[in-house]
């Protein structure tokens, strides 16, 4: 389907895809995340995600959250290492209401002191819940191991001490320094013509003052492979094995995505799932992940297993790495891998909320969006030699870091 784009006079970008659905999705994606925080600000980007819904110049917190929920819509947000999003799903006839609400939240939030103090305790409980979930916490600790001392290494939630220290002034300063109009994208997927979406964008976001930002993100360098064991006293042993990978602008990222899907993607027939779970019964959950960033990237494999089976499980993971380093995919294997990921992309594009976020993030990073057909062509161009070369670089055993909870 056709994708329309425009740039408002203040630099805010707009992207829209019309779909035949009674439900529409709209969001604001901002090129700011936890890596853009100073050390003493750790957690503030995520804290803003919480408290930005706690009242505006004309709405109290209850009326902010009720504005869409009263008509069956959903309001949501997320914070990543490099981006933040505020978005909603709603019946198409409430497009104008949604645009107005998100504009009010982003431009007119007042962050009442009593709401800040209450929400600090909510965020601290969220931090505590992560500490009780080793299968989630281990990812944050692995980032610290991989990106030692770099802003990417710091976890998104922050610490209880820092969260309690945040003030309204801290929040306004962070937003002033990071929420610039040239770093924002309005992303829309719904059954409305583009001219009407553009008119609403200009009506509710066109008057935001122009602001520009130079991305002064400190590049990561000096990676040293490390192995670390942490005593957690958990029933299962949890393990992550990984390495640096390609950044968001590296052409090899498409091949890396395919390699990741072959190894431990969402399908039950991934190599790691077959090896560890189906053939050996060693893990309930095993997965691999590839996350490209502005200047670097991360690849990792996670699994949880019985303590007595840890060494065997690690050896099986490394065996799969070696197979990909030593053996080119055959014609049928490569064809199957391509078809599988193309099918997964087609299915995910049918989730219009995910599609809206994907379009917005792509437009934010690359200032363009490839159609599904263009993405399919890139996947079809990947060769067995490409996969072999990527495997020998990213899955090199001498470059791997390992973190174990036991």
Image: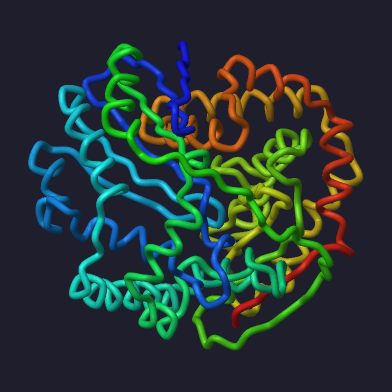
Residue 49: x and y in percent read 35, 58
Residue 75: x and y in percent read 25, 45
Quick check: 154 left or right of 195?
A: right
Quick check: 363 left or right of 99?
A: right
The foreground one among 202 and 130 is 202
Q: Quadrant of residue 220?
A: bottom right
From the viewer's perspective, is residue 339 above or below residue 126? Answer: above
The foreground one among 18 and 301 is 18
State whether residue 393 appears in this view: yes
The foreground one among 246 and 7 is 7
Quick check: 126 left or right of 35?
A: left
Q: Which corner quadrant holds the N terminus?
A: top left
State whether residue 274 appears in this view: no
Residue at 33% across, 34% down: 207
Residue 134: x and y in percent read 50, 74
Quick check: 206 left or right of 234?
A: left
The foreground one among 392 and 223 is 223
Residue at 60% across, 88% down: 231
Q: Quadrant of residue 9?
A: top left
Q: Which corner quadrant holds the C terminus?
A: bottom right
From the viewer's perspective, is residue 333 above or below residue 286? Answer: above
Residue at 77% across, 33% down: 251
From the viewer's perspective, is residue 174 above or below residue 202? Answer: below
Residue at 24% across, 60% down: 110
Residue 393: x and y in percent read 87, 49
């Amino acid at each position: 389907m056709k994708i329309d784009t425009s740039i408002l006079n203040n630099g805010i970008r707009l992207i829209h895809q019309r779909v035949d659905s009674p439900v529409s999705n709209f969001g604001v994606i901002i090129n700011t995340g936890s890596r853009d925080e100073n050390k003493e600000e750790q957690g503030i980007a995520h804290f803003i995600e919480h408290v930005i819904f706690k009242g505006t110049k004309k709405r109290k917190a209850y009326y902010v959250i009720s504005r869409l929920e009263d008509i069956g819509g959903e309001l949501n947000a997320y914070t990543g290492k490099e981006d933040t999003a505020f978005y909603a799903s709603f019946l198409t006839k409430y497009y104008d209401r949604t645009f107005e609400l998100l504009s009010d939240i982003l431009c007119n939030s007042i962050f009442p002191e009593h709401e800040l103090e209450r929400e600090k305790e909510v965020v601290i409980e969220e931090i505590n819940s992560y500490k009780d979930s080793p299968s989630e916490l281990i990812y944050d600790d692995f980032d610290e191991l991989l990106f030692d001392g770099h802003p990417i290494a710091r976890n998104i939630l922050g610490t209880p001490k820092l969260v309690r220290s945040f003030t309204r002034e801290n929040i306004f300063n962070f937003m002033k320094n990071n929420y610039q109009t040239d770093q924002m994208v309005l992303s829309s997927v719904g059954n409305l013509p583009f001219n009407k979406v553009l008119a609403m964008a200009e009506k509710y976001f066109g008057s935001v003052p122009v602001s520009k930002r130079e991305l002064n993100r400190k590049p990561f360098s000096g990676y040293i492979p490390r192995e670390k064991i942490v005593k957690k006293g958990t029933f299962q042993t949890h393990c992550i094995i990984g390495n640096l990978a390609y950044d968001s602008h590296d052409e090899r990222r498409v091949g890396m995505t395919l390699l990741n899907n072959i190894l431990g993607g969402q399908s039950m027939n991934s190599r790691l799932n077959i090896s560890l779970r189906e053939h050996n019964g060693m893990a309930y959950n095993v997965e691999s992940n590839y996350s490209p960033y502005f200047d670097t990237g991360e690849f990792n494999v996670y699994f949880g297993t019985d303590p007595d089976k840890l060494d065997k499980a690690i050896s099986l993971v490394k065996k799969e790495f070696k197979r990909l380093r030593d053996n080119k995919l055959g014609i049928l294997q490569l064809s199957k891998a391509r078809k599988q990921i193309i099918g997964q992309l087609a299915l995910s594009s049918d989730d219009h909320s995910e599609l809206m976020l994907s379009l917005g993030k792509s437009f934010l990073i690359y200032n363009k969006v490839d159609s599904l057909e263009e993405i399919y062509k890139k996947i079809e161009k990947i060769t067995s030699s490409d996969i072999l070369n990527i495997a020998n670089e990213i899955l090199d055993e001498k470059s791997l870091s390992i973190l174990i909870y036991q």
